[in-house]
Image (spheres, rainbow, N blue to C red):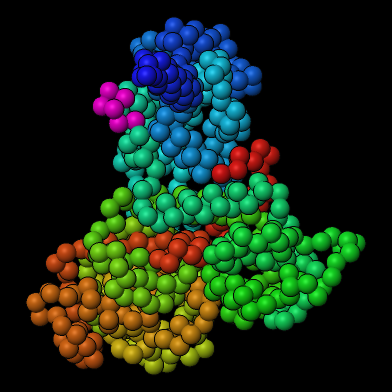
Amino acid sequence: MNTPRKPQRVVALTGLIALLCIGLLFAALAASINTKPYMPPKVAQKYMEHWLIESARNVAGEVRLKHVQSIEPFYLRRDYQPVWMNSFELTEAGRELLQVLRETAADDWRNYGYELATLERETSRLSNIPKQATAVEVLLTDAFITYAQQALNAELLPDTGEGDHPSIRKVSAASKPGQFSEEQIIDLLNDSIRRNELDALVETLTPSHPGYLRLRKELNRYLAIANSGGWYPLPDNLQLTNNERHRLVPHLRWMLGQYGDLQKGALSWLFKDAEERTRAPAEDEPHDLSRPEFLFDSALADALRHFQKRHHLPESGELDANTLKWLNIPPYQMAQKVALNMKRWRHLPRDLGQRHVMVNMADYSLQLINGGSVELDMKVIIGNLQRRTPVMAQKISTLELAPTWSVPKRIAVNSLLPKIRRNPGYLEEKGYQVIGRVDGVDQFISPYAINWNKVSASNFPYRLVQKAGDDNALGSIKFLFPNDKDIYLHDTSQPQLFNLDNRALSSGCVRVEKPRLLAEKLLRGQQGWNRHNIDAAIDQNRTTRIRLQDDVPVYLMYWTTWVDQDGNLQVRDDVYNRDLIAGLPPTNPAVSL
């Protein structure tokens, strides 16, 4: 007797339908999870009008809008639709703007006016509340206008306005660039939105150099450490060396791990005691120093050497007083230092040039960069603390071989005149010539024909010119670039000074360690000027000016922090005291990044 097959088909069909329903249910649930909440235009308009008209002095409960007179018409033309928010989430441009505001204000160099504490708080707790989302929107636009004006009006440039080297010629007020107004910023904003290039506008106002972006990562690192709550300084008298044991070794290990000097093992996350190894017990807490986490081992010594190398310290691998001083810089203060150095990239053009010369005064170094690679590296001597070398961006246009030196009057009366009074023969010994006006005509005058005791700083009617030669203060070569402060690169008659660690010794110009090699590189391919011809002109004291076929950009910069090609944060002494940071923890620290 055959068994009916119809019921089996029904069961199979029922099961298939059930599976299909379950699949559709899960798909619906997934779709509901991934669907972004939507803010209707009328709702956005309602709350935008509230903040811009009714509560412009009390946005998010505390902020008074600075640019409401420009912002309200801007949104009116857009039917009050957001530009930085996509319903209840920040757009890519909004996230980028918030990051830029954060890194710009992180140094506490000035009151930037971004209301960043409120923005950080409100964006960190964004939810499906139209009133809150629209508050973030108008706060971002207000902050953007402030930031754009500061960026375009060159208000974010540190290391300017120093009086060490007064300008040779005065700049007339008419030649100063105009200030960007709120209306112009709104026009830029409207144009970028129309072109769908809002992201690009934010990027245009911010340095895009790789060096800047690498510092951004370090800034976020130190802000995260500051906000972690785990950092505290080591005792000032703590000294440790390899194979010693101490209660605070775990905290030292934690600090070096946070700073990026102690590399975590590939399988460290497998071990349950990994976190315990970086927690130092309290002084009154029982602890067993024989445990491995209290041992200053070779891995910790290597990490300390890495830290010392980054800070240009003797690489002993031991915790000494000088290393401890740098280790104990609070992370919020290091974040301030990094943020201020990020601003220094604003001195530079977006395109540095295929070949360019980069001087870092704080590192006493010069590099010739070609296609992103270092073609030449050397030491430099920079201005002393009374005649600090200024930050500038120019182009080397001319080389002078076997140069003469026209002594600036301030050096003549302050440095040379006392030596001349003691020994008038000093001028002849060092190759100086004295030029004075006789019957309205410049003439050479014998130094022995002058009563130097009657000559003073206020009565110095002579010019001193030093002939080319071994004693010439400019050495064998001078590298000229146009500027109104009479600054240039040059050789020196005292090469032994390059052996010193602190090389802030000149009167403002930059002395270079390998001038002939630098000249050879800059003149490469220029007919008639190979290394042999350069050496011959110098050795014969034949003063020769050579115009470069192609000007080479030169940048005199001051970076006390930067990230090297290996990705390591380098830190140097602030020899010029230009790192104008408060050194205090922020009252409203940024959220952990």
Compare residues 246 and 168 and report the one nearer the observer.
246
- Quadrant hosting residue 113: top right
* Horizontal arrangement in the rendering, residue 177 relative to residue 526 (left or right): right
The reply, left or right, for residue 26 in relation to residue 318 is left
Residue 505 or residue 434, whichever sits in front: 505
Residue 355 lies in quadrant: bottom left
**Residue in the image at 84% along x and 60% along y:** 282
**Residue shown at 71% from the left, 53% from the top:** 230
Residue at image point 65% right, 46% down: 227
Q: Is residue 194 magenta?
A: yes
Q: Is residue 380 depicted above or below 38 in this figure? A: below
Query: Which residue is painted at 60% across and 48% down in the image?
Result: 224
Q: Position of residue 134 (x, y in %)?
A: 51, 18
Q: Is residue 463 visible?
A: no
The outermost residue toward the left is 527
Residue 16: give x, y in percent of width and height: 40, 21
> Does 10 sit left or right of 538 as displayed?
right
Q: In this view, does 265 lie above or below 192?
A: below
Q: Position of residue 60 (x, y in %)?
A: 60, 20
